[in-house]
Image: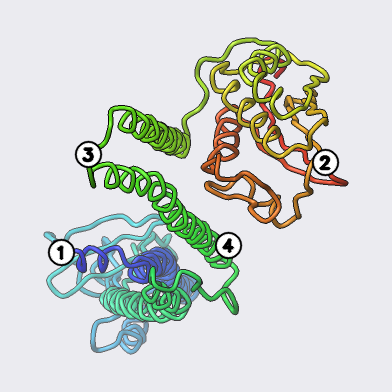
Amino acid sequence: MNARALVSTQSIARRLTLMFALAAAAVFSVTGYALYQFQCIELRRHQLQEIKTRFEFVESLIVRRINNAEKWVLLEGKMTELMPQDGSIIYLVESSNPQFRLGKPFAADAKISYEGNGVRRIVTENGTYLTLNGEIPASGERPAVFLTVGLDASAFDSTSRAINAALVIAFLFGVVVVAGLGWWIARRGLAAVDELSRHAAKLSPLNLAERLPARDLPTELNGLVLSFNGALERVEHAYVQLSTFNADVAHELRTPLGNLIGQTQVMLSRERSAEELTEVLQSNLEELERLRTIINDMLFLAQADRGIRAANLEQTSIASEVSKSAEFLDMLIEDAGVSLQIEGDADTRIDRSLFGRAITNLLYNAIQHCDRLSTIRVHIERNEHVVAVKVSNQGAPVEAHHLERLFERFYRVDSARSDSGNSHGLGLAIVKAIAHMHGGSVFAASNKGETSIGFTIADSYSA
Protein backbone atom coordinates (compact mmCIF):
# COMPACT_ATOMS: atom_id res chain seq x y z
CA MET A 1 0.00 0.00 0.00
CA ASN A 2 1.49 3.36 -1.00
CA ALA A 3 1.56 6.45 1.20
CA ARG A 4 -1.37 8.09 -0.56
CA ALA A 5 -3.56 5.01 -0.12
CA LEU A 6 -2.59 4.84 3.53
CA VAL A 7 -3.53 8.47 4.07
CA SER A 8 -6.81 7.89 2.25
CA THR A 9 -7.60 4.89 4.44
CA GLN A 10 -6.90 6.93 7.54
CA SER A 11 -8.98 9.91 6.36
CA ILE A 12 -10.83 11.59 9.22
CA ALA A 13 -13.74 12.35 6.89
CA ARG A 14 -14.05 8.67 5.99
CA ARG A 15 -13.84 7.66 9.60
CA LEU A 16 -16.55 10.13 10.55
CA THR A 17 -18.69 8.97 7.63
CA LEU A 18 -18.28 5.36 8.74
CA MET A 19 -19.19 6.32 12.30
CA PHE A 20 -22.29 8.16 11.09
CA ALA A 21 -23.27 5.14 9.00
CA LEU A 22 -22.74 2.71 11.89
CA ALA A 23 -24.67 4.95 14.28
CA ALA A 24 -27.51 5.28 11.77
CA ALA A 25 -27.52 1.52 11.18
CA ALA A 26 -27.73 0.86 14.91
CA VAL A 27 -30.53 3.40 15.45
CA PHE A 28 -32.51 2.34 12.38
CA SER A 29 -32.10 -1.34 13.25
CA VAL A 30 -33.49 -0.89 16.74
CA THR A 31 -36.22 1.47 15.54
CA GLY A 32 -37.16 -0.74 12.59
CA TYR A 33 -37.29 -3.87 14.73
CA ALA A 34 -39.45 -2.10 17.30
CA LEU A 35 -41.82 -0.80 14.60
CA TYR A 36 -42.01 -4.23 12.97
CA GLN A 37 -42.85 -5.93 16.25
CA PHE A 38 -45.41 -3.26 17.09
CA GLN A 39 -47.10 -3.61 13.69
CA CYS A 40 -47.16 -7.39 13.98
CA ILE A 41 -48.63 -7.24 17.46
CA GLU A 42 -51.27 -4.75 16.35
CA LEU A 43 -52.22 -6.81 13.28
CA ARG A 44 -52.42 -9.94 15.39
CA ARG A 45 -54.55 -8.15 17.95
CA HIS A 46 -56.97 -6.97 15.28
CA GLN A 47 -57.16 -10.46 13.81
CA LEU A 48 -57.83 -12.06 17.16
CA GLN A 49 -60.37 -9.39 17.98
CA GLU A 50 -62.17 -10.07 14.69
CA ILE A 51 -62.16 -13.87 15.27
CA LYS A 52 -63.44 -13.42 18.80
CA THR A 53 -66.18 -11.01 17.68
CA ARG A 54 -67.37 -13.37 14.95
CA PHE A 55 -67.22 -16.35 17.31
CA GLU A 56 -69.30 -14.55 19.95
CA PHE A 57 -71.81 -13.43 17.33
CA VAL A 58 -72.38 -16.94 15.95
CA GLU A 59 -72.34 -18.43 19.45
CA SER A 60 -74.99 -15.96 20.60
CA LEU A 61 -77.06 -16.66 17.51
CA ILE A 62 -77.03 -20.42 18.05
CA VAL A 63 -77.63 -20.27 21.80
CA ARG A 64 -80.52 -17.81 21.69
CA ARG A 65 -82.39 -18.79 18.54
CA ILE A 66 -81.48 -22.26 17.34
CA ASN A 67 -83.04 -25.16 19.25
CA ASN A 68 -84.60 -27.29 16.48
CA ALA A 69 -83.87 -28.54 12.95
CA GLU A 70 -86.12 -25.99 11.18
CA LYS A 71 -84.27 -23.04 12.66
CA TRP A 72 -80.95 -24.76 11.98
CA VAL A 73 -81.79 -24.75 8.25
CA LEU A 74 -82.36 -21.01 8.47
CA LEU A 75 -79.02 -20.68 10.26
CA GLU A 76 -77.23 -22.52 7.47
CA GLY A 77 -78.59 -20.03 4.94
CA LYS A 78 -77.55 -17.13 7.12
CA MET A 79 -74.07 -18.53 7.65
CA THR A 80 -73.62 -19.12 3.95
CA GLU A 81 -74.35 -15.47 3.34
CA LEU A 82 -71.79 -14.47 6.01
CA MET A 83 -68.96 -16.57 4.55
CA PRO A 84 -67.06 -14.78 1.69
CA GLN A 85 -66.59 -16.62 -1.58
CA ASP A 86 -62.77 -16.33 -1.33
CA GLY A 87 -62.73 -18.45 1.79
CA SER A 88 -61.09 -15.80 3.90
CA ILE A 89 -63.58 -16.57 6.70
CA ILE A 90 -64.92 -20.00 7.50
CA TYR A 91 -67.49 -21.27 9.99
CA LEU A 92 -67.45 -24.88 11.04
CA VAL A 93 -70.00 -26.58 13.33
CA GLU A 94 -69.45 -30.17 14.34
CA SER A 95 -72.12 -32.31 16.05
CA SER A 96 -73.01 -35.90 16.78
CA ASN A 97 -76.25 -35.28 14.89
CA PRO A 98 -75.66 -34.78 11.15
CA GLN A 99 -78.66 -32.39 11.01
CA PHE A 100 -76.80 -29.89 13.14
CA ARG A 101 -73.55 -29.67 11.21
CA LEU A 102 -72.17 -26.82 9.17
CA GLY A 103 -69.17 -26.44 6.89
CA LYS A 104 -66.44 -28.81 5.80
CA PRO A 105 -63.98 -30.04 8.45
CA PHE A 106 -60.24 -29.43 7.97
CA ALA A 107 -58.27 -32.23 6.36
CA ALA A 108 -56.85 -34.81 8.72
CA ASP A 109 -53.28 -34.07 7.61
CA ALA A 110 -53.59 -30.35 8.36
CA LYS A 111 -50.78 -29.00 10.54
CA ILE A 112 -52.08 -27.52 13.76
CA SER A 113 -50.13 -25.29 16.17
CA TYR A 114 -51.38 -23.39 19.19
CA GLU A 115 -50.98 -19.63 19.40
CA GLY A 116 -52.36 -19.22 22.94
CA ASN A 117 -55.68 -17.96 24.33
CA GLY A 118 -57.51 -20.83 22.59
CA VAL A 119 -56.30 -19.71 19.15
CA ARG A 120 -54.87 -22.31 16.80
CA ARG A 121 -52.96 -21.97 13.55
CA ILE A 122 -54.06 -24.52 10.98
CA VAL A 123 -52.04 -24.95 7.78
CA THR A 124 -53.87 -26.67 4.90
CA GLU A 125 -53.44 -26.98 1.18
CA ASN A 126 -55.89 -24.12 0.70
CA GLY A 127 -54.17 -21.74 3.07
CA THR A 128 -53.34 -20.92 6.65
CA TYR A 129 -56.07 -20.06 9.15
CA LEU A 130 -56.23 -18.71 12.65
CA THR A 131 -59.12 -20.40 14.41
CA LEU A 132 -61.05 -20.03 17.66
CA ASN A 133 -63.35 -22.85 18.77
CA GLY A 134 -65.56 -23.78 21.65
CA GLU A 135 -68.46 -26.04 22.63
CA ILE A 136 -72.04 -24.73 22.71
CA PRO A 137 -74.36 -26.59 25.17
CA ALA A 138 -77.49 -28.43 23.93
CA SER A 139 -80.81 -26.57 23.76
CA GLY A 140 -84.20 -28.17 22.94
CA GLU A 141 -83.84 -30.59 20.04
CA ARG A 142 -80.36 -29.31 19.27
CA PRO A 143 -77.56 -31.34 20.80
CA ALA A 144 -74.28 -29.83 21.99
CA VAL A 145 -72.23 -28.58 19.04
CA PHE A 146 -68.54 -27.63 18.58
CA LEU A 147 -68.16 -24.23 16.86
CA THR A 148 -64.99 -23.20 15.01
CA VAL A 149 -64.46 -19.77 13.43
CA GLY A 150 -61.45 -19.42 11.11
CA LEU A 151 -59.82 -16.36 9.60
CA ASP A 152 -57.40 -16.55 6.67
CA ALA A 153 -53.89 -15.60 7.97
CA SER A 154 -52.32 -15.15 4.54
CA ALA A 155 -53.32 -11.46 4.47
CA PHE A 156 -51.64 -11.00 7.82
CA ASP A 157 -48.51 -12.81 6.64
CA SER A 158 -48.28 -10.85 3.39
CA THR A 159 -48.79 -7.58 5.26
CA SER A 160 -46.02 -8.54 7.69
CA ARG A 161 -43.70 -9.35 4.81
CA ALA A 162 -44.56 -6.05 3.10
CA ILE A 163 -43.87 -4.11 6.29
CA ASN A 164 -40.61 -6.00 6.75
CA ALA A 165 -39.52 -5.25 3.18
CA ALA A 166 -40.48 -1.58 3.55
CA LEU A 167 -38.50 -1.30 6.77
CA VAL A 168 -35.45 -2.93 5.17
CA ILE A 169 -35.63 -0.53 2.23
CA ALA A 170 -36.10 2.42 4.60
CA PHE A 171 -33.16 1.13 6.67
CA LEU A 172 -30.84 0.94 3.67
CA PHE A 173 -32.01 4.27 2.30
CA GLY A 174 -31.64 5.92 5.70
CA VAL A 175 -28.12 4.56 6.20
CA VAL A 176 -27.07 5.76 2.73
CA VAL A 177 -28.61 9.20 3.29
CA VAL A 178 -27.03 9.58 6.75
CA ALA A 179 -23.65 8.40 5.42
CA GLY A 180 -23.89 10.94 2.60
CA LEU A 181 -24.86 13.71 5.00
CA GLY A 182 -22.09 12.56 7.34
CA TRP A 183 -19.55 12.82 4.53
CA TRP A 184 -20.79 16.31 3.64
CA ILE A 185 -20.79 17.43 7.28
CA ALA A 186 -17.32 15.96 7.84
CA ARG A 187 -15.90 17.69 4.78
CA ARG A 188 -17.51 20.98 5.81
CA GLY A 189 -16.25 20.56 9.37
CA LEU A 190 -12.73 19.70 8.23
CA ALA A 191 -12.53 22.53 5.72
CA ALA A 192 -10.50 24.49 8.27
CA VAL A 193 -8.06 21.58 8.53
CA ASP A 194 -7.66 21.53 4.75
CA GLU A 195 -6.99 25.26 4.80
CA LEU A 196 -4.36 24.79 7.50
CA SER A 197 -2.80 21.99 5.46
CA ARG A 198 -2.49 24.29 2.45
CA HIS A 199 -0.84 26.95 4.61
CA ALA A 200 1.46 24.36 6.19
CA ALA A 201 2.54 23.19 2.73
CA LYS A 202 3.75 26.73 2.01
CA LEU A 203 6.03 26.85 5.05
CA SER A 204 9.67 26.98 4.06
CA PRO A 205 13.05 27.50 5.71
CA LEU A 206 13.40 30.49 3.42
CA ASN A 207 10.59 32.24 5.31
CA LEU A 208 10.87 31.19 8.95
CA ALA A 209 8.64 34.03 10.15
CA GLU A 210 5.53 32.62 8.43
CA ARG A 211 2.88 31.13 10.73
CA LEU A 212 -0.40 29.27 10.38
CA PRO A 213 -3.47 31.56 10.44
CA ALA A 214 -5.07 31.56 13.90
CA ARG A 215 -8.16 33.64 13.13
CA ASP A 216 -11.71 32.38 12.45
CA LEU A 217 -10.81 28.83 13.46
CA PRO A 218 -13.02 26.32 15.29
CA THR A 219 -12.38 26.20 19.02
CA GLU A 220 -11.02 22.66 18.75
CA LEU A 221 -8.25 23.81 16.38
CA ASN A 222 -7.22 26.98 18.20
CA GLY A 223 -5.09 25.14 20.75
CA LEU A 224 -3.46 22.99 18.05
CA VAL A 225 -2.63 25.97 15.83
CA LEU A 226 -1.31 28.03 18.74
CA SER A 227 0.86 25.11 19.86
CA PHE A 228 2.11 24.55 16.31
CA ASN A 229 2.89 28.24 15.86
CA GLY A 230 4.69 28.15 19.19
CA ALA A 231 6.74 25.22 17.93
CA LEU A 232 7.51 27.18 14.75
CA GLU A 233 8.68 30.11 16.84
CA ARG A 234 10.96 27.84 18.83
CA VAL A 235 12.28 26.28 15.63
CA GLU A 236 12.87 29.74 14.16
CA HIS A 237 14.67 30.82 17.31
CA ALA A 238 16.79 27.66 17.32
CA TYR A 239 17.50 28.04 13.58
CA VAL A 240 18.55 31.67 13.97
CA GLN A 241 20.57 30.79 17.05
CA LEU A 242 22.27 27.95 15.21
CA SER A 243 23.02 30.15 12.22
CA THR A 244 24.40 32.86 14.49
CA PHE A 245 26.34 30.27 16.46
CA ASN A 246 27.89 28.87 13.28
CA ALA A 247 28.87 32.35 12.15
CA ASP A 248 30.32 33.15 15.57
CA VAL A 249 32.23 29.88 15.65
CA ALA A 250 33.68 30.58 12.24
CA HIS A 251 34.64 34.09 13.37
CA GLU A 252 36.21 32.89 16.62
CA LEU A 253 38.18 30.13 14.91
CA ARG A 254 39.24 32.31 12.01
CA THR A 255 41.23 34.72 14.18
CA PRO A 256 43.56 32.18 15.88
CA LEU A 257 43.84 30.17 12.68
CA GLY A 258 44.70 33.34 10.78
CA ASN A 259 47.33 34.18 13.39
CA LEU A 260 48.80 30.68 13.17
CA ILE A 261 48.93 30.71 9.38
CA GLY A 262 50.27 34.28 9.19
CA GLN A 263 53.04 33.71 11.71
CA THR A 264 54.00 30.42 10.14
CA GLN A 265 54.15 31.97 6.66
CA VAL A 266 56.31 34.80 7.95
CA MET A 267 58.69 32.41 9.65
CA LEU A 268 58.96 30.30 6.49
CA SER A 269 59.65 33.28 4.26
CA ARG A 270 63.40 33.16 5.17
CA GLU A 271 65.87 31.48 7.42
CA ARG A 272 65.20 31.97 11.13
CA SER A 273 67.23 31.44 14.24
CA ALA A 274 66.34 28.89 16.87
CA GLU A 275 65.30 31.69 19.28
CA GLU A 276 62.89 33.17 16.72
CA LEU A 277 61.40 29.77 15.95
CA THR A 278 60.97 29.09 19.67
CA GLU A 279 59.18 32.40 20.13
CA VAL A 280 56.83 31.69 17.23
CA LEU A 281 56.14 28.19 18.48
CA GLN A 282 55.24 29.58 21.91
CA SER A 283 52.90 32.10 20.29
CA ASN A 284 51.36 29.37 18.15
CA LEU A 285 50.95 27.23 21.26
CA GLU A 286 48.93 30.01 22.89
CA GLU A 287 46.68 30.22 19.86
CA LEU A 288 46.30 26.43 19.80
CA GLU A 289 45.41 26.45 23.50
CA ARG A 290 42.76 29.05 22.72
CA LEU A 291 41.40 26.88 19.91
CA ARG A 292 41.33 23.87 22.18
CA THR A 293 39.45 25.85 24.85
CA ILE A 294 36.87 27.01 22.33
CA ILE A 295 36.37 23.49 20.97
CA ASN A 296 36.09 21.96 24.46
CA ASP A 297 33.55 24.59 25.50
CA MET A 298 31.54 24.00 22.33
CA LEU A 299 31.53 20.25 22.95
CA PHE A 300 30.40 20.82 26.53
CA LEU A 301 27.55 23.07 25.39
CA ALA A 302 26.53 20.52 22.75
CA GLN A 303 26.26 17.85 25.47
CA ALA A 304 24.28 20.22 27.70
CA ASP A 305 21.87 20.91 24.81
CA ARG A 306 21.01 17.21 24.75
CA GLY A 307 19.51 17.55 28.22
CA ILE A 308 22.28 15.88 30.22
CA ARG A 309 21.78 16.36 33.97
CA ALA A 310 24.43 16.74 36.65
CA ALA A 311 25.25 13.22 37.84
CA ASN A 312 27.97 13.25 40.52
CA LEU A 313 25.99 15.12 43.17
CA GLU A 314 27.52 15.59 46.61
CA GLN A 315 26.27 17.40 49.70
CA THR A 316 28.60 20.40 49.79
CA SER A 317 29.02 23.83 51.34
CA ILE A 318 28.61 26.39 48.57
CA ALA A 319 30.80 28.97 50.31
CA SER A 320 33.59 26.42 50.64
CA GLU A 321 33.44 25.62 46.91
CA VAL A 322 33.48 29.33 46.05
CA SER A 323 36.58 29.79 48.21
CA LYS A 324 38.35 26.92 46.46
CA SER A 325 37.59 28.38 43.05
CA ALA A 326 38.73 31.82 44.18
CA GLU A 327 42.13 30.39 45.19
CA PHE A 328 42.86 29.58 41.53
CA LEU A 329 42.19 33.20 40.61
CA ASP A 330 44.29 34.81 43.37
CA MET A 331 46.85 36.17 40.94
CA LEU A 332 44.18 37.66 38.68
CA ILE A 333 42.40 39.20 41.66
CA GLU A 334 45.65 40.69 42.88
CA ASP A 335 46.57 42.01 39.44
CA ALA A 336 43.13 43.61 39.08
CA GLY A 337 43.59 45.38 42.44
CA VAL A 338 40.29 44.13 43.85
CA SER A 339 39.20 42.14 46.88
CA LEU A 340 36.78 39.22 47.18
CA GLN A 341 34.06 38.92 49.79
CA ILE A 342 31.80 35.85 50.30
CA GLU A 343 28.46 36.45 52.01
CA GLY A 344 26.19 33.69 53.31
CA ASP A 345 26.33 29.94 52.83
CA ALA A 346 24.12 26.98 52.06
CA ASP A 347 24.53 23.24 51.90
CA THR A 348 23.08 21.48 48.88
CA ARG A 349 23.82 18.68 46.44
CA ILE A 350 25.98 19.74 43.49
CA ASP A 351 28.41 18.36 40.96
CA ARG A 352 31.53 19.96 42.42
CA SER A 353 33.53 20.04 39.17
CA LEU A 354 30.67 21.63 37.22
CA PHE A 355 29.90 24.10 39.99
CA GLY A 356 33.57 25.07 40.20
CA ARG A 357 33.64 25.73 36.48
CA ALA A 358 30.53 27.92 36.67
CA ILE A 359 31.68 29.99 39.65
CA THR A 360 35.14 30.36 38.13
CA ASN A 361 33.60 31.77 34.94
CA LEU A 362 31.52 34.24 36.97
CA LEU A 363 34.49 35.35 39.04
CA TYR A 364 36.68 35.71 35.94
CA ASN A 365 33.94 37.78 34.27
CA ALA A 366 33.69 40.01 37.35
CA ILE A 367 37.48 40.45 37.56
CA GLN A 368 37.63 41.48 33.89
CA HIS A 369 34.99 44.18 34.22
CA CYS A 370 35.36 45.52 37.75
CA ASP A 371 36.80 48.87 38.83
CA ARG A 372 40.22 48.87 40.49
CA LEU A 373 40.26 49.00 44.29
CA SER A 374 36.65 47.74 44.36
CA THR A 375 35.19 44.64 46.01
CA ILE A 376 33.74 41.60 44.25
CA ARG A 377 30.98 40.16 46.41
CA VAL A 378 29.68 36.60 46.17
CA HIS A 379 26.27 36.36 47.84
CA ILE A 380 24.87 32.90 48.66
CA GLU A 381 21.24 32.57 49.70
CA ARG A 382 18.64 29.82 50.02
CA ASN A 383 15.20 30.76 48.65
CA GLU A 384 12.43 28.21 49.02
CA HIS A 385 13.72 25.16 47.11
CA VAL A 386 16.69 26.78 45.34
CA VAL A 387 20.09 28.05 46.31
CA ALA A 388 21.06 31.31 44.58
CA VAL A 389 24.70 32.29 43.95
CA LYS A 390 25.20 35.92 42.89
CA VAL A 391 28.51 37.57 41.91
CA SER A 392 28.47 41.38 42.00
CA ASN A 393 31.11 43.84 40.87
CA GLN A 394 31.38 47.59 40.46
CA GLY A 395 32.09 48.82 36.97
CA ALA A 396 30.58 50.16 33.78
CA PRO A 397 26.79 49.66 33.78
CA VAL A 398 25.18 47.20 31.38
CA GLU A 399 22.11 48.35 29.49
CA ALA A 400 18.90 46.36 29.85
CA HIS A 401 18.85 45.09 26.26
CA HIS A 402 22.33 43.64 26.79
CA LEU A 403 21.35 41.91 30.05
CA GLU A 404 18.83 39.76 28.20
CA ARG A 405 21.56 38.41 25.92
CA LEU A 406 24.52 38.05 28.27
CA PHE A 407 24.14 34.27 28.44
CA GLU A 408 24.03 33.81 24.66
CA ARG A 409 27.01 32.09 23.08
CA PHE A 410 29.76 34.38 21.78
CA TYR A 411 27.84 37.47 22.91
CA ARG A 412 29.93 40.39 24.14
CA VAL A 413 28.97 43.85 25.27
CA ASP A 414 31.86 45.40 23.38
CA SER A 415 30.55 48.95 23.59
CA ALA A 416 30.36 48.83 27.38
CA ARG A 417 33.07 46.33 28.29
CA SER A 418 36.76 46.38 27.66
CA ASP A 419 39.35 43.71 27.13
CA SER A 420 36.83 41.45 25.35
CA GLY A 421 39.58 40.01 23.20
CA ASN A 422 40.79 37.90 26.12
CA SER A 423 37.50 36.00 26.18
CA HIS A 424 35.80 33.99 23.45
CA GLY A 425 32.25 34.66 24.76
CA LEU A 426 31.26 31.20 26.00
CA GLY A 427 31.84 31.66 29.73
CA LEU A 428 28.35 32.85 30.70
CA ALA A 429 26.74 30.40 28.24
CA ILE A 430 28.51 27.61 30.12
CA VAL A 431 27.22 29.05 33.43
CA LYS A 432 23.69 28.87 32.05
CA ALA A 433 24.19 25.29 30.86
CA ILE A 434 25.55 24.19 34.27
CA ALA A 435 22.64 25.90 36.04
CA HIS A 436 20.16 24.00 33.86
CA MET A 437 22.04 20.75 34.52
CA HIS A 438 21.37 21.36 38.25
CA GLY A 439 17.69 22.16 37.64
CA GLY A 440 18.22 25.91 38.07
CA SER A 441 18.32 29.09 36.02
CA VAL A 442 20.43 32.24 35.51
CA PHE A 443 19.84 35.93 36.16
CA ALA A 444 21.58 39.26 35.60
CA ALA A 445 21.01 42.81 36.78
CA SER A 446 22.85 46.13 36.55
CA ASN A 447 22.00 49.17 38.63
CA LYS A 448 23.93 52.26 39.73
CA GLY A 449 27.29 51.00 38.54
CA GLU A 450 26.95 47.54 40.10
CA THR A 451 26.44 44.48 37.91
CA SER A 452 25.19 41.23 39.42
CA ILE A 453 25.25 37.95 37.54
CA GLY A 454 24.39 34.61 39.05
CA PHE A 455 22.55 31.32 38.87
CA THR A 456 20.35 29.07 40.97
CA ILE A 457 20.57 25.41 41.88
CA ALA A 458 17.58 23.25 42.75
CA ASP A 459 17.84 22.50 46.46
CA SER A 460 17.31 18.76 46.03
CA TYR A 461 18.67 18.05 49.51
CA SER A 462 15.95 19.97 51.33
CA ALA A 463 13.30 18.85 48.79
Under circle 2, the secondary element is strand
Q: For marks 3 and 4, give the one nearer the viewer.
A: 3
Nearer to me, 404 or 293? 293
Mark 4 / mark 2, whichever is N-terminal: 4
Mark 1 / mark 3, whichever is N-terminal: 1
- Kind of residue at disc 1: Asn
Against 166, residue 357 (above or below) is above
Mark 3 / mark 2, whichever is N-terminal: 3
Q: Rounded to the nearest whole Å, what is the CA distance between mark 3 and mark 4?
A: 72 Å
The residue pinned by badge 4 equals 223
Q: Which residue sits at x=33%, y=62%?
A: 146
Under circle 4, the secondary element is helix
The C terminus - image quarter: top right
- Kind of residue at disc 2: Glu
Within 10 Å of disc 3 (Cα), the crowding (few <14, some 14-19, many 20+) is few
The N terminus - image quarter: bottom left
Mark 3 / mark 4, whichever is N-terminal: 4
Q: Rounded to the nearest whole Å, what is the CA distance between mark 1 and mark 4?
A: 31 Å
The residue pinned by badge 2 equals 450
Left or right? Give the position of 155 relative to 211: left
The residue pinned by badge 1 equals 2
